[in-house]
Amino acid sequence: MNEVYEFDWVKVADFDEMSSFAAKLYERQLLRKPDSVLGLATGASPVGFYEKLVERHAQGTFSFAQTHTFNLDEYIGLQPSHPTSFHNYMEEHLFTKVDLPVTSRHLPDGMADDLNEACLRYETLMRISGGIDMQLLGIGINGHIGFNEPYTSFRTRTHIVDLADSTRTVNAKYFPSKEAVPRQAITMGIETILEAEQIILLAFGEQKVEAVERLKSGVISEDFPASCLHRHPHVTVFFGK
């Protein structure tokens, strides 16, 4: 996939508007295809998105009953029940509030005895499920998507990653200290992400302005992972500050 595409840029007035717009796209996807396979993300950017999606679901117009979800990543070494695991994040913000079957909720296994095998299993499960129909992404200040840090090969699939110091610094707010932030994670690879049918990128706030401007340049380089998205034909970026 070497063709370069332009994004659908949507400037939003505030975080709430961004969250509402993104939730509406996911609602439309589930109304159109109730058995969709949804790619999900964690962190600060999607919190409002999950709130809006739960509100829309409560109105009874769509269901998650036939849906499968796959999260981008998970820390290595944290039990699913750990307060700062992404398993726990998803339980808090979405899973316990909608009718998504427990067996349809998928995240990488950061506690596996064989982590490489866990990565392969995750890829296989996504493939068996039919592939991601709509993938949610945030963007790091260094341009990472998922936990794919700068200079990650665009050919990567689900893999183990050493977290950049800047990433651990940003995520330290969720932990007692920076030293408590895990140094590794399992993440969907860039090639895996690009196989989604549609991609939704959330990029709101002053701290994301520089990353958004670089993304707007259209220059594709492995030192800025999000630039790979210009090789995907269906990307919507919600941005603002």
Image: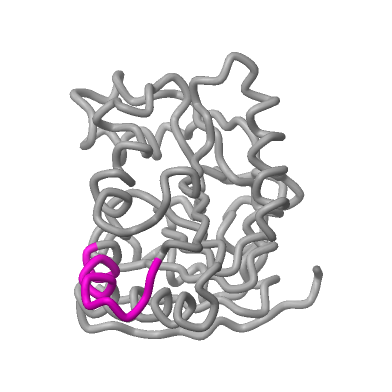
Q: Is residue 58 magenta?
A: yes
Q: Nearer the viewer, residue 201 or 206?
A: 201
- On screen, residue 175 versus residue 232, left or right, reads left
> The N terminus is located in which quarter?
bottom right
Q: Give the percent coordinates (x, y) of residue 129.
A: 66, 55
Residue occupying image coordinates x 33% and y 46%: 90
Q: Nearer the viewer, residue 151 or 38?
A: 38
Model colouring: one colour
Q: Give the percent coordinates (x, y) of residue 96.
A: 26, 49
Report which quarter residue 175 is drawn in.
top left
Report which quarter residue 113 is drawn in.
top right
In the image, residue 166 above or below residue 200? above
- On screen, residue 83 versus residue 124, left or right, reads left
Q: Give the percent coordinates (x, y) of residue 215.
A: 52, 69
Residue occupying image coordinates x 65% and y 33%: 119
In the image, residue 136 above or below residue 75? below
- On screen, residue 231 versus residue 90, left or right, reads right
> The C terminus is located in which quarter?
bottom left
In the image, residue 45 above or below residue 103? below
Residue occupying image coordinates x 46% and y 50%: 142
For the view shown, which residue lies furthest in the right direction?
A: 2
Q: Main secondary structure of the magenta part?
A: helix
Q: Is residue 117 magenta?
A: no
So how many labels did they put on this image?
0
The span picked out in magenta is 51-63
Residue occupying image coordinates x 46% and y 47%: 105
Q: Give the percent coordinates (x, y) of residue 95.
A: 32, 50
